Amino acid sequence: MVLPIDRHSTGLANDLVCDLMDRDLPRQLSARLDALPSVSGLANVAGTSIGSCLLDASTEEWNGMIETNLTAPMTLAKCLIPKMIERGGGAIVNVGSPVGFTGARKPGYAASKAGLIGLTMTIARRYGKDGIRCNLLLPGATITNMTQDWDQTKRDRIASTGFLGRLCNADDIAEVMAFMLSDASRCITGAVIDATAGQMLGAH
């Protein structure tokens, strides 16, 4: 689901249900955007983590993670930036992961999240003068559909690696994201926002 934010409509966001790996995505999104008076924000939240370690990973697994975690955010930004420029600016938040810096067992996941760092900084550098801010949000281990099958032992072990000794929940991350998309963060761009509950720098 893509949620281009339109602050001038009666609602905060307009949803477009689509497959982020669909090659027809730019056309679908363009048609929907033409019906909106303006777009002020984009949050690239969708992600997937599949497959195995490097020697066992398949090309299909690699391509799937790169397309969902990196190509889709690039495509969405490419479609929405012109609309943001028309309205005088906007904000983009890309959701990365600490493994983009540290590496992980699944090479496609780590590589796609590392790629988001470069994409974020490129957008921030190139379109800042157009009033567009772009930042990277690093959530900590968060209980979502990707992690809900973790048993309590695993949750406790991962939580213990952070300074706060806890996992994040969806509301924690949503509130940070709302701040990053709002005018309250108008001086923040090209930044990596650590919302890992101290897991990024904690004892591993």
Image (tube, helix red, strand yellow):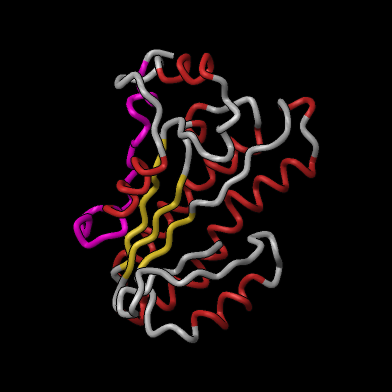
- Please, is residue 14 above or below residue 157 in the view? below
Q: Quadrant of the N terminus?
A: bottom right
Residue depicted at 62% across the width and 44% down the height? 48
The x and y percentages for residue 33 are: 49, 80
**Of residues 67 and 162, the one drawn nearer to the viewer in this rendering:** 162
Residue depicted at 51% across the width and 35% down the height? 100
**Of residues 153 and 109, the one drawn nearer to the viewer in this rendering:** 153
Q: Is residue 197 magenta?
A: yes
The x and y percentages for residue 200 are: 39, 26
Which quarter of the picture shows residue 62?
top right
Q: Quadrant of the C terminus?
A: top left
Magenta span covers which residues? 180-202
- The mark tally for this picture is 0
Residue depicted at 69% across the width and 72% down the height? 24
- Please, is residue 37 above or below residue 98 in the view? below
Q: Is residue 168 magenta?
A: no
**Of residues 121 and 42, the one drawn nearer to the viewer in this rendering:** 42
Is 204 situated left or right of 63 in this image?
left
The x and y percentages for residue 60 are: 79, 44
Residue depicted at 35% across the width and 69% down the height? 12
Q: Magenta part mainly helix, strand or loop?
A: loop
Which quarter of the picture shows residue 36?
bottom left
